[in-house]
Image (tube, rainbow, N blue to C red):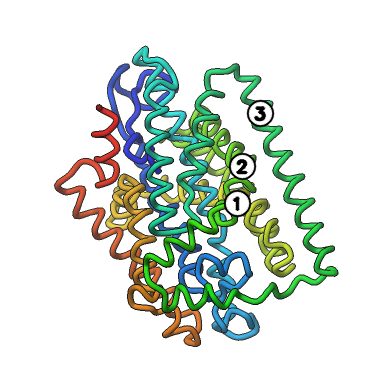
Amino acid sequence: MAEAAETRVATGEGGEGNAGAGTRVRLPLLDVLRGVAILGTLMSNVWIFAGPGAEWGVLSGNTATSAGADSSTLAGAVETVFRSLANGKFLSMLTILFGVGLAIQFRSAAQRGQPWPGRYKWRALFLFTEGTVHFVLVFAWDVLMGYAVVALLVAWLLTRSARAQRVTWIAMGALHLAAMTLLTTALLFASGGATGGGPDTDTDAVTLYAEGGYAEQVAFRLSHAVVLRMEPVLSFALLVFLFLLGVRLFRAGAFQNDAAGRRIRRRLAGWGLGVGLPLTTLAVLGGPGLFLLERYVTAPVLAVGYLGLIGMVMDRLRHPGLLTSALASVGRTALSCYVLQNVLAMLACYGIGLGLASRWADSGPWWVMGLWAVICLVLVTGASLWLRRFEYGPLESVQKRLLRR
C-alpha cells in the first residue's frame, strides 16, 4: 500500500511504455488492482468488526452472524459465499501488489543510479511505525507491520542473484505449505477430527467492544499484543513468497498493455480460477477445521485468478469508465483508504461509536454487507474528490514529506 503512489515507473527497460528512458508514466491496471484489493480486504475485515468480541473473536472462531451459523438458510448461504470469496484472497492480492511496487522502486533506483535499498529503509520504517500506531489505536489485525519487515528482507533479496531469489521463492512456498498442512492436521487431531465449532467467545471481550471505553480497548490490544500479532508470524513465509511472486510478475510484464501482458493475464485467470475456486469450495465445505488451508493456501491461488480476471476485464475496456476511475482513485490513495476504512468500521460497530455490532447482532448478515457497501462508497467518493485537488493521499503525502527530510 505504501507503494500506491509509486505506480509511475521510469521507462526504457522492461517495456514500461513507449516513451524514452527517464519518462515517468502510469500503469493504470495497477491502480485499479490496488483499489479492488483495498475494498476487498474490507470485505473480509468487516466481519471481524461486526462479530462477537470483534478482534478477539477471531481467535475464538466467532466472527459469523447468527444466520451465518446455518448455511442452509438464504441468509446463511449468502454470508458464506460473500465471506468465502473474500477471506484471505484480497489480502493475498494486496501482498502480491506490494511486491510489484517494490520491484518498481528497485528498477527506478537502478535507472537513476541510486543505491539500494537506500532510502527504502526509511520508507519501510515509516510503514512499520504507521502500522504500529494503526494496531494500537484502530485495528488489531493490521498488516502494515508485517509488510514492513518482509519488505526489508525482499529489498535485500533483490540485490542477490536471480537464482538466489528463485530458490528463496520456492523454499518459502514449500515451507509455508508444509507448515499449514501440519498445523491443520494437528488442529483436526486435537479436536478429535471434528470440523465444527470453536471455543466460546471470551465474554469480557464481547463486553469490552460493545460497552467499553476507547482507552480500555487500546489497553486490551497492548496487553494481548503477542497473541494479536501472531498472523504475520504465522504467514511470514507466505508473505515472502507473495512479495517475490509480485516481483516476478512485474518483471515478466504481467501488467503491461501489450500482447505479452494480456497473454499472461489470461493464464493467471485460467489457472488461478480453475484451481483456486474448486480448492476454496472444498476447504469451505470442510468446515472451520480447514480454516488455515482456506485462508493461507487456497486464497493465494484464487487471488492470482482475481488478478488475471480483473486484468482481462480492463483489457476489454476501450475507455475508462466511472467505476474504473473510482477504483483507481482508491488505489492511488491505498494507504489512506486502508486506515480510513478500518476507522469507519470501528466507529460504526464498536460501542465507542454507533455500536451496531451489539444492536444488530441478531439481524443477520445483510447489515454487515450493507455497511461494507456504504464504507466503499465513502472511500471511492472521498478518494476521487481528494485527488481532484491533491496529487497524493493524506498519509501518502505525510510519508513523502518525511522521506524528503
Q: Identify the residue position indicated by label 1 in the image.
A: 230
Work out how far the residue at label 3 is from the one at label 1, CA to CA, in angstroms. 23 Å
Q: Quadrant of the N terminus?
A: top left
Residue 291 horizontal/vertical position (percent):
68, 62
Please determine whether, in this image, residue 240 is positioned above or below residue 210.
Answer: above
Question: What's the residue type where badge 2 is placed?
Answer: Phe
Residue at the farthest top position: 113
Q: Within 10 angstroms of label 1, few (less than 14), some, or many (20 or more) residues?
A: few
Tell me whether the residue at label 2 lies in contact with that at label 3, contact meaning CB atoms closer than 8 angstroms: no
Residue at the spot 52% in from the left edge and 76% down from the top edge:
206
Question: What's the residue type where badge 1 is placed?
Answer: Met
Residue 322, quarter of picture: bottom left
Q: Identify the residue position indicated by label 2 in the image.
A: 236
Q: Is residue 212 visible?
A: yes
Question: What's the residue type where badge 3 is placed?
Answer: Thr
Element at label 3: helix
Which mark sits nearer the N-terminus, 2 or 1?
1
Which mark sits nearer the N-terminus, 3 or 1?
3
Element at label 1: helix
Mark 2 or 1: the one toward you: 1
Work out how far the residue at label 2 is from the one at label 1, CA to CA, in angstroms. 10 Å
Q: Is residue 33 visible?
A: no
How many numbered marks, from 0 up? 3
Q: Within 10 angstroms of label 3, few (less than 14), some, or many (20 or more) residues?
A: some
Residue at the spot 72% in from the left edge and 62% down from the top edge:
290
Residue 371 horizontal/vertical position (percent):
38, 73
Residue 200 horizontal/vertical position (percent):
65, 76
Q: Identify the residue position indicated by label 3 in the image.
A: 168
